[in-house]
Amino acid sequence: MQRQRVIGGLILLGAILIAAILIMLRSDPEEKPPEDLIPLVQAETLEIRSGNLMVSGAGTVRAREELTLAAEVAGKLVYVNPDLREGQRIQQGAVLFRIDSANYRNAVQTAQADVASQSVSVLQAKEEVALAKAELDRFQQRGSSGSSAYASVDSSDYAARILPPDALAQKAAPGEPAAKQPIVPNGLATRKPQLQSAQAGLRRAQANLADARTALERTVVRAPFSGIVRAEDIALGSYVQPGQSLGSMVGTADYEAVIPLSESEAALIPQLFDAGKGSRIQASIFSDYGGVRYRWAAYVDRVNGVLNPQTRTIDVFLRIPRPTGGGSPAADAANAGKSATAASAPPLFVGSFVDAEITGMALDSYAVLPLAALRAGNKVWLVENGRLRIVTVEIYQRTDTAALVSPRGLGTKPVAVTGNLKIATEGLRVRVAEPRPAATSAKNGSTGATSDSKAKTVK
């Protein structure tokens, strides 16, 4: 037992001696300067442009002309155009449907007979006026000769019907010379009221004939313009009433897009509220179809003078001529490498949501700033000589992806930080990450691999 304690003590003492020797023989650690940690950021070179500012917006396409198909007369449908179906195209002047016209043809013949009968009545009244005038002239001659103009007139004669009764009752006293008796016939004596009544009856019959012919013409309904059938509720053999809705169609000659703009955006378009009075303000409409972006030419047709009560924006109406003819592939980066031609372009659809660009004021220069580079308070972080410079910019317009800003204070080739920094201070040293090279397509259409991103300090 005593022996084991001695051995344990010796081992402990030896370990202490070895540890002391190692501590005495150790070398001092090599001193290194602390590493300077420079943040790595993503950045893009801003594009400086000149010319007309393109004011961007978005809106919905709607038909410029739209009507409800309805009958103006009642009757049974005896013909319905086979193209009168939802989505089908109808040419201007094409017969849409016909209503049974038998009753309306009979009404025209009846009205024609009434006109002929009333024409005879007018001729008869004219002859009676001529006879009455001749009788009155003869009595006038008798009265002017000094003899009694009515001495030989009996109450049963025709003349008694055209002369005033009191004139027939006047007789000259015996032995007295007959005085000249002026003739004052009553209204009916000349037969003119009867003629006017007959002429009024003729005009009434002619008006009834015109109404009958109009109703006959309305049994055939034609398309007032070329368009597309939006809805239809019509069947051959059904009975329709005047004003009954049978469908609707939209005109395809022109569409329009309603683009809401803020007051600051509208102020960028010169003479916007004079649109339609002088030169046209050109615009473009963009729509995606099958992954390809297409463009249609347009122009400002009118501007709503009342603010939208919900959005407090100004509605600008763009007119789009020939929208169904197909657009042209847009000169856009999104179309790079895609095979698209004008022949494969689709028509512009009513109700589709589109982007728009309206020609604005001409500027000597302006910068296109990615929206990721715009900070709170309209500030931009620029990288110059490896250090951060913070500037405040004037924004002309902001879209979903970019902002158009004044180039004042940005320099000639500005590089803006698009990534995030925990702390951004004036003069902070930064490193800009090199952008990854674009993927190259092989002959078989496969996409090649991209290299790892590297970092460098901008000097």
Image (cartoon, rainbow, N blue to C red):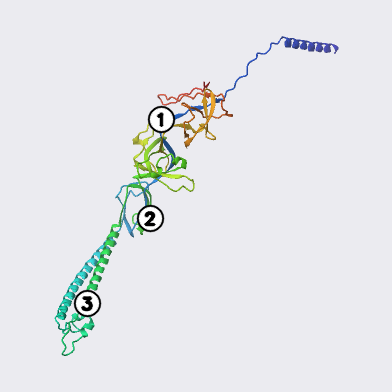
> Which residue occupies 37% across, 54% down?
246
Q: Quadrant of residue 34?
A: top right
Comparing 182 with 313, the one in front is: 182
- Which residue has dot 3 on it? 189
Residue placed furthest toward the bottom: 174
Which disc number belongs to residue 21? none
Give the label, 1 or 3, closer to the camera: 3
Marking on residue 245: 2
Near mark 2 (Cα within 10 A), the count class, few <14, some 14-19 or many ≥20, is some
Q: Answer left or right for 439 relative to 428.
A: left
Camera-near label (3 vs 2) is 3
Q: Position of residue 384 (x, y in %)?
A: 51, 24
Q: Quadrant of residue 51?
A: top left
Picture quadrant of residue 144: bottom left
10 to 412, vertically: above or below: above
Q: What's the residue at 75%, 11% (across, down)?
A: 20
- Disc 3 residue type? Ala
Residue 149 location (% of width, % of height): 16, 82
Which of the pair 209/229 is nearer the observer? 209
Badge 3: how crowded within 10 Å, few (<14), some, or many (20+)? many
Q: CA distance from mark 3 to mark 2?
A: 57 Å
Q: Estimate the spatial distance between the alpha carbons at disc 2 and disc 1, rounded to whole Å.
A: 48 Å
Q: Amino acid at mark 2?
A: Ser
Q: Nearer the viewer, residue 22 or 262?
A: 262
Q: Are marks 2 and 1 in contact (CB under 8 Å)?
A: no
Label 3 element class: helix
Identity, as a three-letter code, of the amino acid under mark 1 = Ala
What residue does disc 1 label? 336
